[in-house]
Image (cartoon, grey):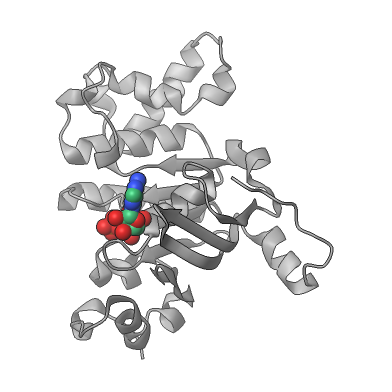
Amino acid sequence: MSMKLVTPETPQTDREALAASPLAIRGLTVSYAEKPAVFSVDATFQPGKMTAIVGPNGAGKSTMLKAALGIVTPLSGRVTAWGNPLDTMRARIAYVPQRASVDWDFPTRVLDVVLMGQYRQLGLLGRVKTRHIQTAINCLERVGMDGFADRQIGQLSGGQQQRVFLARALAQDADLYLLDEPFAGVDAATETAIISVLKSLREQGRTVVAVHHDLSTVADYFDWVFVINTSKVAEGPVAEAFTQANLQEAYGGRLATAQIGVTG
Ligand SMILES: Nc1ncnc2c1ncn2[C@@H]1O[C@H](COP(=O)(O)OP(=O)(O)OP(=O)(O)O)[C@@H](O)[C@H]1O
Protein backbone atom coordinates (compact mmCIF):
# COMPACT_ATOMS: atom_id res chain seq x y z
CA MET A 1 0.00 0.00 0.00
CA SER A 2 1.13 3.59 -0.41
CA MET A 3 2.48 4.93 2.84
CA LYS A 4 3.74 8.49 2.90
CA LEU A 5 5.33 10.42 5.68
CA VAL A 6 3.49 13.44 6.98
CA THR A 7 4.52 16.24 4.63
CA PRO A 8 5.61 19.69 5.84
CA GLU A 9 2.56 21.28 4.22
CA THR A 10 0.29 19.26 6.50
CA PRO A 11 -1.43 21.86 8.67
CA GLN A 12 0.02 22.02 12.16
CA THR A 13 -3.26 21.12 13.81
CA ASP A 14 -3.70 18.03 11.69
CA ARG A 15 -0.08 17.10 12.25
CA GLU A 16 -0.67 17.25 15.98
CA ALA A 17 -3.80 15.15 15.59
CA LEU A 18 -1.85 12.58 13.60
CA ALA A 19 0.96 12.46 16.15
CA ALA A 20 -1.48 11.79 18.98
CA SER A 21 -3.57 9.23 17.16
CA PRO A 22 -2.70 5.51 17.39
CA LEU A 23 -4.28 5.15 13.94
CA ALA A 24 -5.02 7.97 11.53
CA ILE A 25 -6.27 7.53 8.00
CA ARG A 26 -6.33 10.21 5.34
CA GLY A 27 -8.00 10.06 1.94
CA LEU A 28 -8.41 6.28 1.94
CA THR A 29 -10.10 4.82 -1.14
CA VAL A 30 -10.34 1.08 -1.77
CA SER A 31 -11.97 -0.55 -4.78
CA TYR A 32 -12.79 -4.14 -5.57
CA ALA A 33 -13.22 -4.60 -9.32
CA GLU A 34 -13.55 -0.84 -9.85
CA LYS A 35 -16.39 -0.48 -7.36
CA PRO A 36 -15.35 1.63 -4.37
CA ALA A 37 -15.86 -0.17 -1.06
CA VAL A 38 -14.31 2.74 0.87
CA PHE A 39 -14.25 6.21 -0.60
CA SER A 40 -12.03 9.10 0.46
CA VAL A 41 -12.20 8.32 4.17
CA ASP A 42 -10.43 10.27 6.90
CA ALA A 43 -10.37 8.85 10.41
CA THR A 44 -8.52 9.87 13.54
CA PHE A 45 -8.88 7.19 16.20
CA GLN A 46 -8.49 8.51 19.71
CA PRO A 47 -5.81 7.31 22.13
CA GLY A 48 -7.01 5.52 25.26
CA LYS A 49 -10.59 5.31 24.00
CA MET A 50 -12.84 2.53 22.77
CA THR A 51 -14.22 3.33 19.33
CA ALA A 52 -17.01 1.46 17.53
CA ILE A 53 -16.99 1.40 13.73
CA VAL A 54 -20.64 1.09 12.68
CA GLY A 55 -22.46 1.05 9.37
CA PRO A 56 -24.76 -1.23 7.38
CA ASN A 57 -23.71 -4.53 5.77
CA GLY A 58 -21.25 -3.88 2.98
CA ALA A 59 -20.47 -0.35 4.23
CA GLY A 60 -16.72 -0.94 4.04
CA LYS A 61 -15.98 -1.34 7.75
CA SER A 62 -13.78 -4.43 7.42
CA THR A 63 -12.20 -3.12 4.24
CA MET A 64 -11.22 0.11 5.98
CA LEU A 65 -9.42 -1.79 8.76
CA LYS A 66 -7.77 -4.21 6.34
CA ALA A 67 -6.59 -1.40 4.07
CA ALA A 68 -5.26 0.54 7.06
CA LEU A 69 -3.17 -2.51 7.96
CA GLY A 70 -2.06 -3.20 4.39
CA ILE A 71 -3.99 -6.49 4.19
CA VAL A 72 -5.77 -5.13 1.13
CA THR A 73 -4.17 -2.55 -1.13
CA PRO A 74 -5.90 0.82 -1.32
CA LEU A 75 -6.14 2.90 -4.47
CA SER A 76 -5.03 5.90 -2.49
CA GLY A 77 -4.59 7.17 1.01
CA ARG A 78 -2.07 7.31 3.79
CA VAL A 79 -2.08 5.76 7.19
CA THR A 80 -0.06 6.71 10.25
CA ALA A 81 0.24 5.20 13.70
CA TRP A 82 1.22 7.70 16.40
CA GLY A 83 2.29 9.96 13.56
CA ASN A 84 4.68 7.39 12.05
CA PRO A 85 4.39 5.16 9.01
CA LEU A 86 2.32 2.18 10.06
CA ASP A 87 4.98 -0.35 9.08
CA THR A 88 7.33 0.97 11.75
CA MET A 89 4.67 0.60 14.44
CA ARG A 90 3.33 -2.90 13.75
CA ALA A 91 4.66 -4.38 16.98
CA ARG A 92 2.37 -2.02 18.91
CA ILE A 93 -0.75 -3.00 16.96
CA ALA A 94 -2.82 -6.17 17.47
CA TYR A 95 -5.47 -7.20 14.95
CA VAL A 96 -8.27 -9.66 15.62
CA PRO A 97 -9.81 -10.63 12.26
CA GLN A 98 -13.37 -11.76 11.69
CA ARG A 99 -13.71 -15.27 13.06
CA ALA A 100 -15.36 -16.42 9.83
CA SER A 101 -12.27 -15.45 7.81
CA VAL A 102 -10.08 -18.06 9.53
CA ASP A 103 -9.55 -21.73 8.63
CA TRP A 104 -10.45 -23.36 11.93
CA ASP A 105 -9.78 -26.84 10.49
CA PHE A 106 -6.05 -26.09 10.44
CA PRO A 107 -4.54 -28.66 12.84
CA THR A 108 -3.14 -26.62 15.70
CA ARG A 109 -3.62 -26.29 19.44
CA VAL A 110 -5.10 -23.33 21.29
CA LEU A 111 -1.76 -22.77 23.06
CA ASP A 112 0.07 -22.51 19.73
CA VAL A 113 -2.39 -19.91 18.44
CA VAL A 114 -1.83 -17.77 21.53
CA LEU A 115 1.95 -18.22 21.33
CA MET A 116 1.76 -16.75 17.83
CA GLY A 117 0.87 -13.44 19.49
CA GLN A 118 4.46 -13.37 20.79
CA TYR A 119 6.17 -14.10 17.50
CA ARG A 120 7.99 -10.76 17.54
CA GLN A 121 9.58 -11.62 20.87
CA LEU A 122 10.26 -15.16 19.71
CA GLY A 123 11.85 -14.15 16.41
CA LEU A 124 11.72 -16.26 13.29
CA LEU A 125 13.81 -19.13 14.66
CA GLY A 126 13.26 -18.38 18.33
CA ARG A 127 12.69 -21.20 20.76
CA VAL A 128 9.56 -21.14 22.87
CA LYS A 129 10.64 -20.82 26.48
CA THR A 130 8.74 -21.41 29.71
CA ARG A 131 8.08 -17.69 30.10
CA HIS A 132 6.42 -17.52 26.67
CA ILE A 133 4.16 -20.43 27.60
CA GLN A 134 3.40 -18.80 30.95
CA THR A 135 2.43 -15.55 29.18
CA ALA A 136 0.17 -17.47 26.80
CA ILE A 137 -1.51 -19.32 29.70
CA ASN A 138 -2.01 -16.00 31.56
CA CYS A 139 -3.70 -14.54 28.47
CA LEU A 140 -5.93 -17.61 28.19
CA GLU A 141 -6.83 -17.12 31.87
CA ARG A 142 -7.82 -13.51 31.20
CA VAL A 143 -10.41 -14.71 28.67
CA GLY A 144 -11.55 -17.69 30.75
CA MET A 145 -9.96 -20.29 28.45
CA ASP A 146 -7.04 -21.60 30.53
CA GLY A 147 -8.48 -25.12 30.58
CA PHE A 148 -8.31 -25.33 26.79
CA ALA A 149 -4.59 -24.92 26.04
CA ASP A 150 -4.19 -28.41 24.52
CA ARG A 151 -7.49 -28.42 22.60
CA GLN A 152 -7.40 -28.46 18.79
CA ILE A 153 -8.85 -25.18 17.50
CA GLY A 154 -11.31 -27.06 15.28
CA GLN A 155 -12.92 -28.37 18.45
CA LEU A 156 -13.92 -25.00 19.88
CA SER A 157 -17.31 -23.29 19.85
CA GLY A 158 -17.63 -19.92 18.09
CA GLY A 159 -17.44 -17.99 21.35
CA GLN A 160 -14.39 -20.00 22.46
CA GLN A 161 -12.67 -19.29 19.14
CA GLN A 162 -13.26 -15.59 19.63
CA ARG A 163 -11.81 -15.72 23.16
CA VAL A 164 -8.71 -17.55 21.88
CA PHE A 165 -8.21 -14.87 19.23
CA LEU A 166 -8.47 -12.21 21.89
CA ALA A 167 -5.94 -14.11 24.05
CA ARG A 168 -3.53 -14.12 21.09
CA ALA A 169 -3.91 -10.34 20.77
CA LEU A 170 -3.36 -9.92 24.53
CA ALA A 171 -0.16 -11.98 24.26
CA GLN A 172 1.12 -9.40 21.80
CA ASP A 173 0.93 -6.78 24.57
CA ALA A 174 0.01 -4.11 22.03
CA ASP A 175 -1.02 -0.49 22.55
CA LEU A 176 -3.69 -0.49 19.82
CA TYR A 177 -6.22 -3.32 19.44
CA LEU A 178 -8.20 -3.50 16.19
CA LEU A 179 -11.04 -6.03 16.26
CA ASP A 180 -13.37 -7.00 13.41
CA GLU A 181 -16.76 -7.91 14.85
CA PRO A 182 -15.51 -9.43 18.13
CA PHE A 183 -19.07 -10.12 19.32
CA ALA A 184 -20.39 -11.76 16.14
CA GLY A 185 -22.08 -15.06 16.91
CA VAL A 186 -20.95 -15.29 20.54
CA ASP A 187 -23.16 -15.98 23.56
CA ALA A 188 -23.96 -13.43 26.26
CA ALA A 189 -21.33 -14.82 28.67
CA THR A 190 -18.59 -14.53 26.03
CA GLU A 191 -19.72 -11.02 25.09
CA THR A 192 -19.50 -9.98 28.75
CA ALA A 193 -16.06 -11.59 29.09
CA ILE A 194 -14.75 -9.87 25.95
CA ILE A 195 -16.09 -6.43 26.82
CA SER A 196 -14.62 -6.71 30.29
CA VAL A 197 -11.17 -7.50 28.83
CA LEU A 198 -11.47 -4.60 26.36
CA LYS A 199 -12.44 -2.20 29.14
CA SER A 200 -9.47 -3.34 31.20
CA LEU A 201 -7.22 -2.57 28.21
CA ARG A 202 -8.71 0.93 28.10
CA GLU A 203 -8.09 1.32 31.85
CA GLN A 204 -4.43 0.59 31.11
CA GLY A 205 -4.46 3.48 28.61
CA ARG A 206 -4.57 1.30 25.52
CA THR A 207 -6.72 2.03 22.49
CA VAL A 208 -9.49 -0.24 21.22
CA VAL A 209 -11.19 0.06 17.82
CA ALA A 210 -13.87 -2.51 16.96
CA VAL A 211 -16.21 -3.07 14.04
CA HIS A 212 -19.52 -3.44 15.83
CA HIS A 213 -22.97 -4.44 14.64
CA ASP A 214 -25.23 -4.18 17.65
CA LEU A 215 -26.34 -0.54 17.76
CA SER A 216 -28.13 -1.15 21.08
CA THR A 217 -24.82 -1.61 22.94
CA VAL A 218 -22.75 1.16 21.33
CA ALA A 219 -23.49 3.69 24.06
CA ASP A 220 -22.80 1.15 26.82
CA TYR A 221 -19.58 -0.25 25.47
CA PHE A 222 -17.88 2.57 23.57
CA ASP A 223 -16.69 6.16 24.08
CA TRP A 224 -16.32 7.11 20.42
CA VAL A 225 -18.07 6.09 17.26
CA PHE A 226 -17.11 6.13 13.59
CA VAL A 227 -20.12 5.90 11.25
CA ILE A 228 -19.44 4.81 7.68
CA ASN A 229 -21.35 3.95 4.55
CA THR A 230 -18.56 3.72 1.95
CA SER A 231 -17.77 7.37 2.80
CA LYS A 232 -17.47 8.61 6.34
CA VAL A 233 -20.75 9.81 7.80
CA ALA A 234 -19.55 10.93 11.23
CA GLU A 235 -16.82 10.48 13.81
CA GLY A 236 -16.76 11.68 17.42
CA PRO A 237 -17.74 11.02 21.01
CA VAL A 238 -20.82 8.76 21.21
CA ALA A 239 -22.87 11.61 22.70
CA GLU A 240 -22.18 13.78 19.65
CA ALA A 241 -21.81 11.43 16.70
CA PHE A 242 -24.16 8.55 17.52
CA THR A 243 -27.24 10.49 16.49
CA GLN A 244 -30.45 9.54 14.77
CA ALA A 245 -29.57 11.80 11.84
CA ASN A 246 -26.15 10.19 11.34
CA LEU A 247 -27.51 6.66 11.59
CA GLN A 248 -30.30 7.39 9.16
CA GLU A 249 -27.78 8.82 6.75
CA ALA A 250 -25.71 5.65 7.02
CA TYR A 251 -28.44 3.02 7.22
CA GLY A 252 -31.24 4.75 5.36
CA GLY A 253 -34.88 4.20 6.30
CA ARG A 254 -36.11 4.37 9.83
CA LEU A 255 -34.32 2.84 12.76
CA ALA A 256 -35.96 2.05 16.07
CA THR A 257 -34.00 4.85 17.68
CA ALA A 258 -35.58 4.39 21.11
CA GLN A 259 -33.98 0.95 21.25
CA ILE A 260 -30.52 1.95 20.14
CA GLY A 261 -30.01 4.75 22.62
CA VAL A 262 -29.01 7.42 20.13
CA THR A 263 -28.70 11.06 21.01
CA GLY A 264 -30.22 13.96 19.15
N1 LIG B 1 -12.45 -9.56 -1.47
C1 LIG B 1 -13.45 -8.88 -2.01
N2 LIG B 1 -13.66 -8.89 -3.34
C2 LIG B 1 -14.67 -8.17 -3.90
N3 LIG B 1 -15.53 -7.41 -3.20
C3 LIG B 1 -15.37 -7.37 -1.87
C4 LIG B 1 -14.33 -8.10 -1.20
N4 LIG B 1 -14.42 -7.86 0.14
C5 LIG B 1 -15.47 -7.02 0.29
N5 LIG B 1 -16.04 -6.72 -0.89
C6 LIG B 1 -17.18 -5.81 -1.12
O1 LIG B 1 -16.80 -4.55 -0.61
C7 LIG B 1 -17.90 -3.94 0.07
C8 LIG B 1 -17.50 -3.66 1.50
O2 LIG B 1 -17.30 -4.89 2.18
P1 LIG B 1 -16.85 -4.95 3.71
O3 LIG B 1 -16.71 -6.39 4.06
O4 LIG B 1 -15.70 -4.07 3.92
O5 LIG B 1 -18.12 -4.31 4.43
P2 LIG B 1 -18.56 -4.37 5.95
O6 LIG B 1 -19.08 -3.02 6.29
O7 LIG B 1 -17.45 -4.88 6.80
O8 LIG B 1 -19.75 -5.42 5.84
P3 LIG B 1 -20.43 -6.41 6.92
O9 LIG B 1 -21.04 -5.56 7.98
O10 LIG B 1 -21.46 -7.11 6.09
O11 LIG B 1 -19.34 -7.32 7.44
C9 LIG B 1 -19.07 -4.91 -0.06
O12 LIG B 1 -19.85 -4.49 -1.15
C10 LIG B 1 -18.40 -6.23 -0.34
O13 LIG B 1 -19.25 -7.08 -1.10
What residue is shown at x 64% (from left), y 40% (from top)? Answer: 87
Q: Is residue 232 above or below residue 239?
A: above
What residue is shown at x 24% (from left), y 77% (from top)? Answer: 260
| Res 220 quadrant in image | bottom left
| Res 24 quadrant in image | bottom right
Q: Is residue 119 above or below residue 7?
A: above
Residue 255 image offset from top left, x and y in percent = 21, 82
Look at the image and tell me whether residue 30 can be seen: yes
Residue 253 image offset from top left, x and y in percent = 21, 84
**Left or right, 250 with reference to 161:** right
Q: Is residue 233 above or below residue 161?
A: below
Residue 247 image offset from top left, x and y in percent = 32, 80
Residue 46 image offset from top left, x and y in percent = 56, 63
What residue is shown at x 28% (from left), y 18% (from top)? Answer: 109
Q: Nearer the viewer, residue 57 or 51?
A: 57
Q: Nearer the viewer, residue 263 or 69?
A: 69
Indicate the quadrant of ligand 1 in the picture. Answer: bottom left
**Left or right, 1 with reference to 236:** right
**Left or right, 6 with reference to 218:** right
